Image (cartoon, helix red, strand yellow):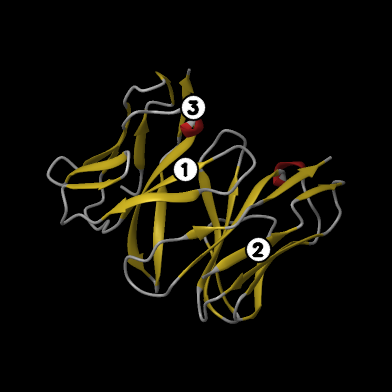
Amino acid sequence: QQQVKQSPQSLIVQKGGISIINCAYENTAFDYFPWYQQFPGKGPALLIAIRPDVSEKKEGRFTISFNKSAKQFSLHIMDSQPGDSATYFCAASSYTGGYQKVTFGTGTKLQVIP
Amino acid sequence: SQTIHQWPATLVQPVGSPLSLECTVEGTSNPNLYWYRQAAGRGLQLLFYSVGIGQISSEVPQNLSASRPQDRQFILSSKKLLLSDSGFYLCAWSRQGIGETQYFGPGTRLLVL
């Protein structure tokens, strides 16, 4: 019940195209849904995050769509650029035991080709 | 602004040797601190978390231990490394409270030979 399922495992997109990564969860206690971007050899960096009372959040070229009833959320990268090539992790977290416990998806390796 | 540091950046150690990885956070007080391990091409596995000085909780049984001697210092240790301890170790911090984001450090690449 604590799993977050992420797909696809890898994604190749042409420059200027739309990259879409999907995640699904089971635990309705999750109350915060961040996305992280990780470049090789670096730590994950927070990209964008959403709370379950909002259906969509947009920051620049990055948009999270959230469907609470379906327990699914997705990341859309508009006008994808080669610099967006990285691994993306969705995550879901809930407050338990005095801390925000984060469950991560397995990651999507995105390659944007010129 | 807050900054999180990890060192060393890279470490090559023989099997059976001890380990000490250090993480420090600047620009905040009383943070929650976390140690994760990331295997090559895999997701992140939470190893330890701490909500205060001397308070350590372990998520999975393993060959590692953690300590928090100061408010903004988190140390990952082992008395005897195993080959399976190789990986990318990430420290993270968050503010205390509901719905707070975890922010990650640059990581330490550990190779046990």
The local secondary structure at tag 2 comes to strand
Q: Name the residue under label 1.
A: A37
Q: Is there CB contact under 8 Å for labels 2 and 3?
A: no
* Chain letter for mark 1: A
* Chain letter for mark 3: A
Cα gap from disc 3 to disc 1, whole angstroms = 14 Å
Q: Which residue is drawn at 49% across and 50% down?
A: A45
Task: Give amino acid for label 2.
Answer: His
Q: Above or below — where is A74 with respect to B59?
A: above
Q: Is B96 left, or right, of A26 in this rendering? A: right
Q: Mark 3 points at which residue?
A: A82
Q: Above or below — where is B83 with respect to A33?
A: above
Task: Give amino acid for label 3.
Answer: Pro
Q: Name the residue under label 2.
A: B5
The image quadrant that residue B42 belongs to is: top right
Q: Which of marks 3 and 1 is nearer the N terminus?
A: 1
Cα gap from disc 1 to disc 2, whole angstroms = 18 Å
Task: Give amino acid for label 1.
Answer: Gln
Q: Quadrant of the C terminus of chain B?
A: top right
**Coordinates of residue A6 in the picture (x, y in percent):** 36, 34
Q: Is A8 left, or right, of B1 in this rendering? A: left
**Coordinates of residue B29 in the picture (x, y in percent):** 52, 81
The image quadrant that residue B99 belongs to is: bottom left
Q: Residues within 10 Å of mark 1 (few under 14, many from 20)?
A: many
